[in-house]
Amino acid sequence: MTRAAENASGTVGESRSDAAPRRRGRPGKDHETVLREAIDLFNEQGYDATSMGDLAQRLGFTKSALYHHVPSKEHLLQAALDEALDGLSEAVASARADRSASALDRLRGAVRGSVGILVDHLPAVTLLLRVRGNSPAELAALDRRRRIDADLTALVADAAAEGGIRSDLPPDLISRLLFGMVNSLTEWVRPGGPRSADEIADALTTLAFDGLLTDRD
């Protein structure tokens, strides 16, 4: 997944001048910890309503220390959105590239892979689904989402042309409905919940594709 470059010190909350042994006190935070906390806070309060001061308070150190290692709030938003989008893009692209499988199986694989990314990166995907294009990072994310939608639509069209699914529905409509089912998982799936990603993917693809399969003798 795409990550913003980390400071050479490897931690947030301590300065480069800390060559001497650390004094006892609050431990530093690494970049990954800062990003996780930022995503959670953006989801709780909304990105626009969250300040760097809010994040510094959540992490337990000063705003100036946070700015020393993280250039901006949008820097963190960009890293979070890239995390979600890189995973979703790879899930669809890898399915399209698998020419050893039928078009229907490639489509199933793309949907299954998208479910896996959503479950494994639930906070980042939840944040992605809430962006509205209010900043350059959000506009870029929406553009990437449109390209992923187009790739899934192409998979739907291939499956219909091959006879794997019904062809009387527009491919872009089917694509939106499939991604709509996947995205709806953010409303109720929780980390550590009783259902695994595989169980959820099995149920979702069975429900979706049993309704799309053409009749067979």
Image (cartoon, helix red, strand yellow):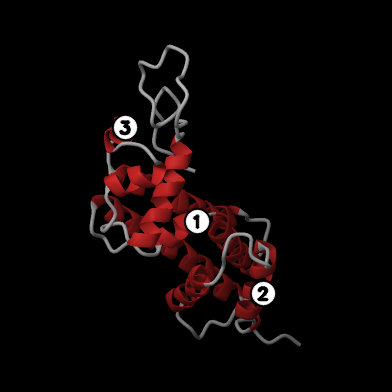
Q: Is residue 106 left or right of residue 122?
A: right
Q: Residue at x 39, y 40 (%)?
A: 60
In the foreground, 163 or 22: 22
Asked whether, in this view, residue 163 is left or right of residue 16, the answer is: right
Which mark, residue 193?
none
**Residue labelled with disc 2:** 203
Q: Position of residue 13 (x, y in %)?
A: 38, 31
* Residue found 63% across the figure and 60% down from its top: 192
Q: Residues within 10 Å of mark 2 (few under 14, many from 20)?
A: few
Say which amino acid is labelled 3: Ala
Question: What x and y, as percent, mark residue 209?
Answer: 63, 78
Residue placed under numbered mark 3 in the picture? 65
Determine which of the numbered discs, if any, sits on residue 88 in the image: 1
Identify the image quadrant of the C terminus.
bottom right
Q: Secondary structure at mark 2?
A: helix
What's the CA distance linking mark 3 and mark 2?
46 Å
**Tag 1, which secondary structure?**
helix
- Label whose residue precedes the other's in the sequence (3 or 2): 3
Amino acid type, mark 2: Ala
* Residue 2 in view: no
Q: Residue furthest top?
A: 20
The earlier-in-sequence mark between 1 and 3 is 3
Query: As shown in the figure, which amino acid type bears the numbered disc 1?
Result: Leu
Q: Is residue 4 above or below residue 17?
A: below
Residue nearest the viewer, comparing 58 with 101: 58
